[in-house]
Structures are given as structure tokens and as C-alpha cells.
Amino acid sequence: MSLHGIAPPLAWAPLIASYWHLDGDSVVDIHGGVALVFNLGDPVTVDVQGRDSLQVASPFLLGGLSRRVGFRADGDLRLFGVRFRPCGVFPFFSMPQMEFAGQCVVLDELWELKGLGVVEAMARGRGDAPDDYACRFNEFFAARRDSFLSYGRVVAMAVAVIRRECGNVTMAVLAAECGVSRRHLERLFDERIGVTPKHLARMFRLSLALGHLPSSDAADVAARCGYFDQSHLIRECRCLTDYSPSQMHPSS
């Protein structure tokens, strides 16, 4: 058995604690953040202290372990692992890390990595040296991080446009201003905010209208905030809050 540790590039050090490459059966201590492990050999049995063994042939994830983990295989056992720092894994997994803390999870079950090409990238050249795998993952991680940050910028830009337009913006215009398709924008909002851009715009416009109601006529507020008429404002308020504007502001 040989365990090779590889330091990540300096730029990744705040996010990735280390890379490691394992040849042959071994028991190792894994502490702290999530470890993403690529199986480069035959199916491997993973023995996590205090849990049932799991045999895997594909990449897998060790979630926030602070215990001993054994790796064994009947044939060729070769693993390449990426150990993230607790704050470094979010570009890959936006779900709370507590959901897979202390577990061994087969990568196929993590939908967020499907279609990203990391498995295919790491599977190329199975006989490569450990440093080659590290370089390959560095390239993938850089692209993934840039994509992740780009998504964040798109959502922030869309929210800024909605705010600027007081909620009165069509989704076609919003998507065009952000430089993405409407479908892509909706998917980003669903992942990051939990509501569609259109729903957020409706909520923002209603919030502005309700803020004006205590001191202004409801019909004037409706016209000022982009509603067809007062009835439209009332229907929208009931739809989004289950209350009428007068129930939200009894004095209005």
C-alpha cells in the first residue's frame, strides 16, 4: 500500500485541503470536510467505522467523516481523492453538507455532478501518475468554480433589474438583460432562491404597492405600481398573500 499526498495549487488552498492517491488495501483516518473519491481500479469495498460496508465501482463521496475508513478490493485497488475544506465544497454541492455527513454516497446519486464531465475527465488515462490526476481535477475545478460564480452573478443581476423596474419587467426582457435564456434563468432562480423570476417580480411589485397604501388611494397606488386597476391589485394581493389589501392595511 502507498498513500501519496499532493498539495493543491495555492489559489485552491482555501477550498481544497489536499489530494491523495491510494494504491492497495488500506485503513486511513479521514477528518473534517467532504472527500470526493474517484475509483481508478476494480470495485472497492468501503468500510466506514460504525457503519455497514458498501461496495462501489464508480466514484463516491465521503461526507464530513471524523473516523477510520477502510478500502479493500479483490483486484486492483487505486483511488484518487479530493478532500475539500468545509467551505470549499459548495460549488459542487449546494445542498447542506449535514445531509451526507458521516456517509459514503455513490456519486450517481448526486444529481448536481451529472453531466459536468468530471467523471469522464478523471477516467481518462487510468495509468497516469497521481500528479496528472491532480492537474486534471484542477482544470475541472477552475471551470466549475467560474461557472458557479457566473451563475451567482446572473441571479444578482436579475434581482437588481427587478428592483430597478419595481417588479414591472417581462421575463423575456429580464433574461435578455442578463444574457441568458428565460429557461436557464428560471432554473438558476429555482436552485438559488426557490421561486421563479416572475414570482419574485410579482412579490416585489406588491410589496411596493402595500407600502404606499396606508397614505395613498388604492386606485392611484394600483396605477402607479403597474396594475391594470384596483381590482387587479386586490386579486394579486389575495393570490400572493391570501389577504386583501384592506386586510393587510385596515386603514387603507
Image: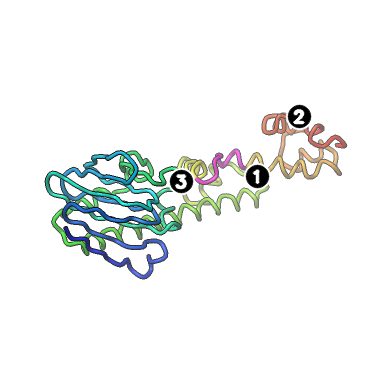
Q: Secondary structure at mark 3?
A: helix
- Please, which residue is most extreme toward the front here? 50
Residues shaded magenta: 192-200
- Asked whether residue 195 is drawn in magenta, I would say yes
Residue for point 62% across, 48% down? 162
Q: Amino acid at mark 3?
A: Met
Where does label 3 land, which residue?
98
Q: Secondary structure at mark 1?
A: loop
Residue 167: x percent and y percent? 65, 44
Residue for point 42% across, 65% down? 14
For mark 2, does the 10 Å Cα neighbourhood hold few (<14), some (14 to 19), or many (20 or more) residues?
few
Decide which of tag 1 and tag 2 comes sooner along the chain: 1
Marks 2 and 3 sit apart, C-alpha to C-alpha, by: 47 Å
Could you tell me if the residues under marks 1 and 2 are in contact, i.e. CB atoms within 8 Å? no
Residue 154: x percent and y percent? 50, 52
For mark 3, does the 10 Å Cα neighbourhood hold few (<14), some (14 to 19), or many (20 or more) residues?
few
Where does label 2 land, which residue?
231
Q: Amino acid at mark 2?
A: Ser
Residue for point 18% across, 60% down? 2
Where does label 1 land, which residue?
167
In this rendering, would 210 be left or right of 18? right
- What is the quadrant of residue 111 in the picture? top left
Marks 1 and 3 sit apart, C-alpha to C-alpha, by: 36 Å
Asked if 168 appears above or below 87 in the picture, the reply is above
In the foreground, 128 or 250 = 128
